[in-house]
Amino acid sequence: MTKPTVLTVILNFRTAAMTIKAAEAALREMHDMPGTLLIVDNDSGDGSFEALQKAVKEQSWVSPRVQVLQTGHNGGFGAGNNFGIRHGFSQGIDGKVPDYVYILNSDAFPEEGAISILCQHLEHNPKTGLAGSYIHGPDGDAHLTAFRFPSVLGELEGAARFGPISRLLKRSIVPLPIPEATCSVDWLAGASMMIRGQVLQEIGLFDEAFFLYFEETDLCRRAARAGWLTDYVRDSSVMHIGSVSTGMKTWERIPQFWLDSRQHYFRRNHGRAYEICATLAHLLGGCIPRLRGLFQGNSISQPKYFLNDLAFHALRTAVKGNSNRPRQISFPKGLSPLNGEQA
């Protein structure tokens, strides 16, 4: 029986040493899989590309099994991964489009069997389009990586963080309790995610209008609308440090790209009116912990001026249409987008 082919993409941005460690872990788990590993430097500008090339040469990793690519432009997470996927699809594996694409963060390290378990899950579940791993930190604590799709009520609950409201809106809470067994979810964080090649052929790649954040949410949403399931695979375990490239843990103020991505997600998937309602719900809910903090003396664990920035961002863009347009996959000449056979 022919083994399925896997294209693994690791996106690097100024984390060359850690990226090599992630590549080492991925290659260890891919040793008996037909496939290719692409390390994509997202225009780091700090010597990462040269360092990655040197490290791959010193490791004596076989080309084209392992390749280092340079995007030439930092278009964000989705654009960087798309660059690698397009390259991998243009080359093909054994003359065909890869059966699966595995996206791995540069600060994520697959444990024993992690990649093959995702692959086997997709092989045995033909209705599943995307599969993601159980993610834990260096301390062993599980990370929240399984979610419901964002909604107006979910925005209200997430901003309010108030027991009675959370109980009332429990079916709208976006972060799901960490699953104890494999199950279907709405969307998964992209630290360790395998995507069926057919899904990308049908719905396109990541929407490059998202610079960072919400791109996985949008991809899973489009897959769901096309009839594909997204599964959380509990037996596939990956250690993830988290926020190494983005610096999210140390944000003092919410960056513009997060606000842009959030707005684009709601507008693209639900329309402008819904996006406005979602923002109003978040602003309303966000007033509750602040009022409680005034009376109870509690601090708010949120970037400074978050609600102000969210409100002003909404006002600035209220009269503007969403000029960002999703960029769909374009298949290279010589490869059919449906079956991978030579055209």
Image (cartoon, rainbow, N blue to C red):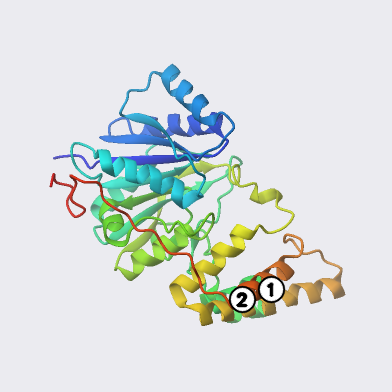
Please report whichever mark, 1 or 2, sits nearer to the chain's N-terminal start. Answer: 2
Question: What residue is shown with label 2?
Answer: 279
Dividing the picture into quarters, in which one does residue 48 lie?
top right
Please state if 51 lies on the left or on the right of 161 as rendered: left
Circle nearer the viewer, 1 or 2: 1
Per the model, the C-alpha gap separating discs 1 and 2 is 8 Å
Which secondary structure lies at badge 2? helix
Question: What residue is shown with label 1?
Answer: 311
- Please provide percent x and percent y for residue 197: 28, 51
* Residue that appears at 27% across and 42% down: 90
Q: Nearer the viewer, residue 111 or 192?
A: 192
Q: Nearer the viewer, residue 227 or 78?
A: 78
Does residue 319 appear in the picture of this structure?
yes
Please state if 177 lies on the left or on the right of 90 as rendered: right
* Residue that appears at 37% across and 30% down: 67
* Residue that appears at 51% across and 61% down: 214
Mark 2 Cα shell of 10 Å, populated few (<14), some (14-19), many (≥20): many
Type of amino acid under label 2? Thr
In this rendering, the answer to whether 157 lies above or below 255 is below
In this rendering, the answer to whether 180 lies above or below 49 is below
- Please provide percent x and percent y for residue 126: 24, 58
Residues at marks 1 and 2 touching, judged by CB atoms closer than 8 Å: yes
Type of amino acid under label 1? Ala
